[in-house]
Amino acid sequence: MRVLVVEDDPPLAEAVCRRLREEGLAVDWAADGDEANTMVELTRYDLIILDWLLPGRDGVTLLRQWRQHRVFTPVLILTARDQVDNRVEGLDAGADDYLVKPFAFPELLARVRALLRREAAYQRDPVLRVGNLELDTVHRVVKRAGNTIELTNKEYAILEYLMRHPGQVLTRTQIAEHVWDYDFTGSSNVVDVYIYNLRRKIGDEGEPRVIRTIRGAGYQLRGSSSAGDDGAAQAAPPENAPDTRGVQP
């Protein structure tokens, strides 16, 4: 899941981004309305946390513009304005939730989780299934053939992204941009390392694989184990373990 934080107070923005990343989310930060608008045009976010008072275009004006342009990403407004009329204005502009500053981080995180669950339930079954692999997006539990699998936050995020796009070939860049944020500066093979570890944990090291390497393209999650159903895509031969030096779990 990828979240955009729009906040012009750097210390607060840094604290919010850090806590969200600890929850296993990929987080981007915009310091003003213009930057936020550009990022929303270029990237699909699962949630936007939007400060009301911003340099240039304020948050509510920006939100109205997004809704007029059919950007329906869930939005949580953060603001020091605590009057009922202010809350009504924010919600009427298209906000999905409203949190008054100063706030407690546990409440912010609970509201974020609630909005992400609501969006997942609205769009799709919260339990993703591909073959005998299951991922419960509400409880963050992964099972294969009924056996629970323990994953790190990044491994879980990669698997969820693959399972939301079964059969689709996802490039390493697409995976990195979805799971990490714009400031990510990891090694060039970091996605390969995580895929290798993920395969090992879900018991996907033999052939045919559920997570398949598509030569020259990226990775593809397949629910079928039958041979010859790949169309034009060709799976690469079994890979050796990638160099994991310098890659953090």
Image (cartoon, rainbow, N blue to C red):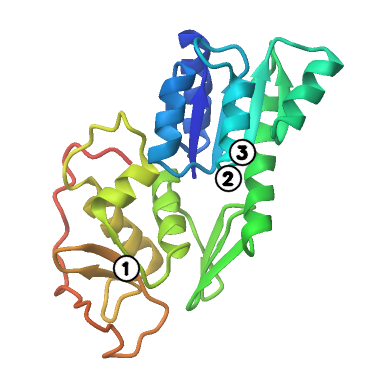
Query: Residue at 51% of width from left, 76% of height from top?
Result: 145
Q: Is residue 6 above or below residue 66?
A: above
What residue is pinned by disc 2? 70
Q: Is residue 87 above or below residue 120?
A: above
Q: CA distance from mark 3 to mark 2?
A: 5 Å
Under circle 2, the secondary element is loop
Q: Tag 3 or tag 1, which sits nearer the N-term? A: 3
Mark 3 near mark 2, Cβ–Cβ under 8 Å?
yes
Q: CA distance from mark 2 to mark 1?
A: 30 Å
Taking the view exactly as shown, the residue that stands out farthest to the right is: 84
What residue is pinned by disc 3? 67
Under circle 3, the secondary element is helix
Labels 1, 3: front one = 3
Left/right placement of residue 53 relative to residue 243 reads right
Mark 1 is on which residue type? Gln
Q: Residues within 10 Å of mark 2 (few under 14, many from 20)?
A: few
Mark number displayed over residue 220: 1
Left/right placement of residue 243 relative to residue 182 reads left
Percent across and percent down for residue 153 are 45, 44
